[in-house]
Each structure stands twice: as structure tokens, then as C-alpha cells.
């Protein structure tokens, strides 16, 4: 036997206390209850909407994982998907620990994704600030600008020049492109675009990790009637 959720109008099993789609508690009255009989113990606790996030409880856990991930993910990103995987796992465990602190221990996938989004935003912004601050400190305070320029020429300018040559670019076009890439504006624009791309990837992986945490952990703990 199925009933219909009053919020999203999706089918809900009759023995389920929550809608599997939106997480709304499904309160039912049964005429079989004996008058004067005490309600089951599970109804003595306040009912929580599983689609809502208690940010006062979630934020400390978010900060606990977002700050280390903000330091580590940008450094591990050049190693491939290691930094992105670390970001997803950080959001995953944020959701796991948050769910374990809730009664009942269940949240919807959407709520887990929102927790992952906040975790990813905080981590990626911290990582972007660290990248910018470290480059500024190396060039201005440590006077190691030449090392940055040499690394830029080896990792960016030379490969791109070879690619342009293989594409058949003539000498004037090649000189114009190299001039733009090696100019302060070109380098700043390239680095900024790379950092924005990294931020977007980290946020997407964090959202996925948060949704996966809610899905994998809370599915087995969904309250039943």
C-alpha cells in the first residue's frame, strides 16, 4: 500500500515515516490505535525535516575539513585527480559526521549536496587565496620572480609555441602570440583562468562527495514505521 506525499505528490510506502524524494515527515493516523494508549516512543522526539540543514551543527564540521582541504587540494591538483578526489572525500566525511549527529540519522541527497557545496566553496576560495598569496610573496618579498618566469616559460610558453608551430602559424602570428603569453597581462589572465577552473572543479567534486555521503550513509538508516 502506498500513500502520496503532501509536498511533492510522490508515492510513499505506507510503512515509511519520511518521503524518499523530498524528506518530508509523513504523519499518519491509524484507527487501530487503542484510545488512551501511549504513542510509540519514536514519536516522543521532535520531527526533523530531513531536507533541511542545521547549519549551526554543520558549519563546525565543514570548517574542520574545508580548511585542511583548502591547503592540500591545490598542491595535489597537478598530480591529476588526487586533489579533486581529496575534495570529494572531505565533503563526503563532512556529511557523514553531520548525519551521525542528527536524530533521525538521515538527510536527503539534496541536503548532502548543499553541505558539499559550502565545503567546496570554502576550500576552493582558501586554496585560490593561498595560490595568489604565495605567488605574490615569492615575487615581491622573496625576490624570486626569475624562478617563476623560468617555470612559466618551460611549462607554458615552450609547449604552446610548439603547438602553434605544428598548427602552421606564420612568424608574425607566432611572435604576436608569444608576446601576449609572456606579457604581464597575458600571464595574469592565464593564471586567473586556471585558478577559476580549479575552483569550479573543486566545488563540483565537493557537491558530488556530499551527495554521495548522504546517499550511501543515510539509505540504510532511513527511519521506518
Image (cartoon, helix red, strand yellow):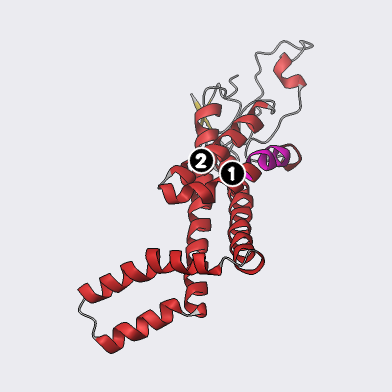
In the rendered view of the protein, which quadrant contains the C terminus? top right
State if disc 2 and disc 1 touch (CB < 8 Å).
yes
Q: Note whether 117 is above or below 161 in the view shown.
A: above
Would residue 134 appear left or right of 207 to someone viewing this image? right
Tell which circle, 1 or 2, labels the residue nearer the N-terminal end: 1
**Closest to the observer, 99 or 168:** 168
**Closest to the observer, 205 or 23:** 205
Q: Residue visible at 51% across and 33% down? A: 215
- Callout 1: 10 Å neighbours few (<14), some, many (20+)? many
> Is residue 59 on the magenta stretch?
yes
Please tell me the numbered disc located at residue 86.
2
**Closest to the observer, 131 or 206:** 131
Please tell me the numbered disc located at residue 69.
1
Range drawn in magenta: 58-66
Would residue 176 appear left or right of 222 to someone viewing this image? left
Q: Residue visible at 53% across and 57% down? A: 199
Query: From where the camera sits, is residue 222 visible?
Result: yes
Query: Residue 77, percent across and down?
Result: 47, 50
Q: Note whether 169 is above or below 56 in the view shown.
A: below
Query: From where the camera sits, is residue 4 visible?
Result: no
Please tell me the numbered disc located at residue 111.
none
Secondary-structure class at tag 2: helix
Amino acid at each position: 500500500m502506498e500513500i502520496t506525499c503532501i509536498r511533492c505528490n510522490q508515492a510513499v510506502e505506507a510503512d515509511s515515516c519520511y518521503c524518499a524524494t523530498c524528506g518530508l515527515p509523513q504523519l499518519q493516523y491509524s484507527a487501530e490505535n487503542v484510545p488512551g494508549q501511549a504513542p510509540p516512543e519514536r514519536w516522543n522526539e521532535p520531527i526533523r525535516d530531513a531536507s533541511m540543514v542545521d547549519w549551526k551543527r554543520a558549519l563546525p564540521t565543514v570548517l574542520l575539513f574545508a580548511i585542511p582541504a583548502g591547503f592540500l587540494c591545490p598542491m595535489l591538483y597537478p598530480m591529476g585527480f588526487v586533489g579533486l578526489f581529496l575534495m570529494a572525500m572531505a565533503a563526503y566525511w563532512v556529511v557523514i559526521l553531520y548525519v551521525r549527529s542528527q536524530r533521525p540519522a538521515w538527510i536527503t541527497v539534496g541536503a548532502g549536496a548543499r553541505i558539499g557545496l559550502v565545503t567546496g566553496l570554502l576550500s576552493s576560495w582558501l586554496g585560490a587565496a593561498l595560490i595568489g598569496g604565495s605567488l605574490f610573496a615569492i615575487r615581491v618579498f622573496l625576490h624570486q620572480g626569475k624562478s617563476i618566469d623560468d617555470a612559466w616559460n618551460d611549462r607554458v610558453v615552450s609547449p604552446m609555441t610548439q603547438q602553434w608551430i605544428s598548427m602552421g602559424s606564420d612568424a608574425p602570428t607566432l611572435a604576436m602570440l608569444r608576446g601576449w603569453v609572456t606579457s604581464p597581462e597575458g600571464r595574469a589572465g592565464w593564471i586567473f583562468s586556471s585558478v577559476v577552473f580549479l575552483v569550479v572543479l573543486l566545488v563540483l567534486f565537493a557537491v558530488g562527495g556530499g551527495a554521495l555521503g548522504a546517499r550511501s550513509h543515510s539509505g540504510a538508516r532511513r527511519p521506518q514505521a
